[in-house]
Structures are given as C-alpha cells and as structure tokens.
Image (cartoon, grey):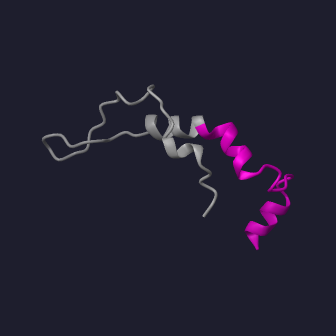
Amino acid sequence: NKIKTVLQNSGTKGGSTTPEAWWNTHGDDFWKAIKCGIKTSGKDTSGSEKFSGEECGVFYPPESDTYSQFVW
C-alpha cells in the first residue's frame, strides 16, 4: 500500500516514454556508466580484483546494441 501511495502522489505517470525512446536517448550514457563505473577487473597478486582504467573513455557500443533488447 505504501508503494501505491507514493506512486499515486509522485505527480507523474509512467509510460509516457517507450523503452525504445528512452534507450535511444540514454543508451550511450548507460554504456559509458557501465564501462567507467567498473572499479575492479582482473586479479592482482593478493587475489583482489583490479581495474586498469584504460577502458574508461573509450566507448564503442556493442554490435548487438543495434537490436532492440526490449524484445524478449
């Protein structure tokens, strides 16, 4: 009930933007956040994961990004 009340009082209604339209607007930022938000990758001598950081700033959308991921 609390969730329903919050949603009803939020002042906006969902569904005003299609998933495809949202993705077209925000897809590049999404992938950049995924790549640059990674803090660890690979293992160092202690067994901890490390991230080189070289991938951040270099952005190539995955080839599959041209296909709608909203089709299940």
Q: Could you tell me residue 57's position as x and y percent?
A: 45, 25
33 with respect to 52 (left or right): right
Taking the magenta stretch, the answer to whether it contains residue 24 is yes
| Quadrant of the frame with the C terminus | bottom right
Residue positioned 78% across, 68% down in the render? 4
Q: Measuring 80% from the left and 56% from the top, which residue is drawn there? A: 14
From the viewer's side, name the closer residue of 59 and 37.
59
Q: Residue at x 68, y 40 (%)?
A: 24
Which residue is nearer to you in this view: 5 or 25?
25
Q: Is residue 4 above or below residue 17?
A: below
Q: Dividing the image into 4 quarters, which one contains the N terminus?
A: bottom right
Q: Looking at the image, which residue sits at the far left? A: 45
Where is residue 69, by image quadrant?
A: bottom right
- In the rendering, at what x and y percent does residue 52 appear? 29, 31
Q: Residue furthest bottom?
A: 1
Range of magenta residues: 1-27
45 inside magenta stretch: no
Q: Which residue does the image show at 66% across and 44% down from the upper left?
A: 23
Q: Is residue 53 left or right of residue 19?
A: left
Residue 71 image offset from top left, x and y in percent: 63, 60
Mark count? 0
